[in-house]
Amino acid sequence: MQGAAGAGSGSDDTLPKLLVRNAQTLRDRPAMREKDLGIWQTWSWQEVLNEIRRFSLGLSELGIGRGDKVAVVGQNRPRLYWTFAAVQALGGVPVPVYADSITEEMAFVLDHAEVKAAVCEDQEQVDKILDISEQVPSISFVVYDDQRGLRDYDHTRLKSFEDVQALGDAALKADAGRERAWHEQIAAGKGSDLAVILYTSGTTGRPKGVMLSQDNLVISARNATAFDNFDETEEVVAYLPLAWVGDHMFSYAQSYVAGYCVCCPESPETVNDDRREIAPTYFFAPPRVYETLLTAIMVRMEDAGPLKRAMFHALMRHARKVGERILDGESVGLGDRLLYRLGEVLVYGPLKNRMGFTNIRVAYTAGEAIGPEIFRFYRSLGMNLKQLYGQTEASVYITMQPDGTIDADTVGTPPPGVEVKIAESGEVMFRSPGVFVGYFKNDEATKTTKTEDGWVHAGDAGIFTAEGQLKIIDRAKDVGHLNDGSLFAPKYIENKLKFFPNIKEAVAFGHERDFVAVFINIDLIAVGSWAERNNVSYASYQELAGLPRIYEMIAEHVAQVNRDLAAEPMMASSQIKRFLVLHKELDADDGELTRTQKVRRSFIAERYQPLIDALYDGTTEKFVATEVTFEDGRRGVIEANVKIRDAEMFEPAKPSGLSEAAE
């Protein structure tokens, strides 16, 4: 399938050029906000240009020029976003790094990218860079934003953001022509210039550096902006990792294309409160964020009085009945509309306000499948929540859901300029203006992923529905078969389990085995709230996960998933036969998840091989000792006797239209 042709880009074919354009045409409109010490600070587009120009000239004085790589490390701070444009204005290439990366992960990325400098948020990130300085000898200097704790450090190679801007100011004072030369350098930039290197999460090995050009980002952002009619009046909250392509698109590239305002929360811990104050019009979140918000709501409602709880459930039933139809502009009776308006006053409006979604015009989710009930919950409130399917190698966009054609089981159709097809193997392939330039210093991987005529192997198995919507089944490499030859799609099973609020993560096993078995992580917030309401005492996640009543609860969820699978002819043989509740939460610091919270299957299979063996040899309890990494970097060992249970299974449904006599 193919989307309509994308909009033309004109002369504004790089992000620094768009910055200059916005400073001229949107001069005094807000471009960026940051909450600091409880107060929102705002910068206009003209002020942002001034800040970036000063910093960019300072970097130039320190030797940063065309082709140089600059690492950007930290949370969502205005100065780190400004660094992107400041480096690109000089022809350099920013390399954002996950703020929660451990030093070993960071050392690999920065050494592989050959970074010349690093711009860090605070002391924590500076310490990481200094720790790996011998492993990454190419780093000539480090810049920091927040100076707390850094006063007594050796500043031979360490500079504050203000110090670098002061160098830029001095250069302008010494040579009045420097400003003109800087703007001429921006004007000389081309859409084909390398814009950024974003490293993949590394689910199957070392991360790969995805090279995206200015054309990749600008054209994709322009097409996506036109798709949803975004303009300079939008407000977004920047809270996702800087190193993730989604944040680079939503909080940087699209902002420069549409001219809208990006708001940085005070800290990761205050995101929900800060979002409520900003009330963004455009919002993106992976399914887990929407699931967590809904879990918190349901927990609060369980603690509410009987009358309030009854009103909530009654009006939510009505919202599920007519909310989506009203949102999609369908015909709804007057009585239902009036009751829905009452619900908006009493329940739906306050709920959206509590979550910070009062002014939402468009919201997206992607990354994993979202539970249909969760998806419909938000849409029933009148929130235009949609799904998209994308990848770093596509500059995000592969498919999107147009308004009025929303299906919880699909991820939409190709947006403007994107072509999508299904290969004979069942793998999704795409071609678009957003297709990446290649993997940095990895031509072999580039040739494996990207064909000579520009088609990219997405790595996911999918199908098109009769309505032309793309449906993702699983990662192509993860789809396997049980020993009896029946299909085994682990992510499909895992996502069904994760639709339950009590289950945070699941890992399914079954390829080349006799049956399917799963590891399950409980959600500590949801299950902990249940334990409190039911007077169940526990001292730790490990103790809570092993309680018999928790196993009973999870067994009911597994049975429901098996009931659903039994009704699907292709998946009926993949019912879960045995399961266990893992004694610890899967953690990126322990290597079990990527920094984008994706399961690293091969690592988990190797690390927990004794538990996998126990699932398949009939054992009902297995002692394990697992090394863990604590938040302060210390290592320890968690020991536990993990219980293993058999699951309830169901007879597969008979194919429709086939009578018993015919059988």
Image: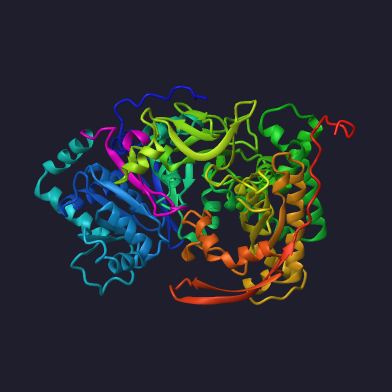
Q: Residue furthest top?
A: 5
Task: Please provide percent x and percent y for residue 121.
Answer: 35, 60
Residue at figure coordinates x 48%, y 22% from the top left: 4
Name the residue nearer the viewer: 343 or 181.
181
Residue at figure coordinates x 63%, y 51% from the top left: 494
Task: Please provide percent x and percent y for residue 463.
Answer: 59, 32
Task: Please provide percent x and percent y for residue 384.
Answer: 61, 38
Kindly indicate the quadrant of the structure image that contains residue 41: bottom left
Q: Residue furthest right?
A: 661
Task: Please provide percent x and percent y for residue 538.
Answer: 68, 75
Q: Residue furthest left?
A: 174
> In which quadrant will I find the C terminus?
top right
Relative to 149, 340 lies left or right: right
Height in image: 654 above or below 297? above
Height in image: 629 above or below 433? below
The answer to whether residue 569 of the structure is visible from this angle is yes
Colour scheme in use: rainbow
* Residue 189 is inside the magenta segment: yes
Residue at figure coordinates x 73%, y 65% from the top left: 551
Relative to 71, 601 lies left or right: right
Height in image: 27 above or below 557? above
Q: Residue furthest front?
A: 484
Name the residue nearer the viewer: 101 or 646.
646
Height in image: 356 above or below 268? above
The answer to whether residue 600 of the structure is visible from this angle is no
Q: Which residues are magenta?
A: 188-216
Kindly indicate the quadrant of the structure image that contains residue 343: top right
